[in-house]
Image: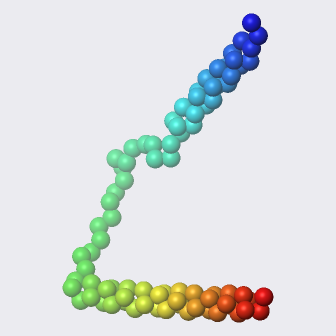
Amino acid sequence: MGGEGSMLAAINSLKNNRSLLSKRKEKSALGGSYSNVKLAKFPKATAEQLKEIRNRTIKENRKTRIKTMLCFILFLILISTFLYLI
């Protein structure tokens, strides 16, 4: 019967691909030991500092939201002008 050679080649190809895959998984970036790593100690934040950080974050988020909305409105104006002219 014909076709046995091509099927054998497909099986060998799958085996070779599987062996390559397992070799790639062994070289992970997070491998190793963390026994010699020293953890950093951060100071505790006071209530006043937390309020200041919160207020600053709220202001930054508000500015970002306004910029995003202005860009969106400008984009809509440009699109509507383009569609009107067509």
- The answer to whether one can see residue 47 in this image is yes
Taking the spot 32% from the left edge, 60% from the top edge, the residue there is 39
Identify the image's colour scheme: rainbow, by chain, secondary structure or one colour: rainbow
- The vertical placement of 45 against 13, above or below, is below
For the C terminus, the image quarter is: bottom right
Give residue 50's position: percent from left, percent from top.
27, 84
From the viewer's perspective, is 31 left or right of 47?
Answer: right
Taking the spot 38% from the left edge, 85% from the top edge, the residue there is 57
- The vertical placement of 75 against 40, above or below, is below
Say which of 11 and 36 sits in front.
11
From the viewer's perspective, is 86 left or right of 28?
Answer: right
- The answer to whether one can see residue 5 in this image is no
Say which of 85 and 46 sits in front.
85
Give residue 46's position: percent from left, percent from top.
22, 83
Taking the spot 52% from the left edge, 89% from the top edge, the residue there is 69
Question: Which image quarter: residue 23?
Answer: top right
Question: Which image quarter: residue 47?
Answer: bottom left
- Farthest top residue in view: 1
From the viewer's perspective, is 22 left or right of 10?
Answer: left
- The vertical placement of 85 against 13, above or below, is below
From the viewer's perspective, is 30 left or right of 20?
Answer: left
Give residue 81's position: percent from left, percent from top.
71, 93
Taking the spot 73% from the left edge, 89% from the top edge, the residue there is 82
- Farthest left residue in view: 47
For the N terminus, the image quarter is: top right
Q: How many marks?
A: 0
- The vertical placement of 67 against 44, above or below, is below
Say which of 70 and 86 sits in front.
86
Give residue 84's position: percent from left, percent from top.
73, 92
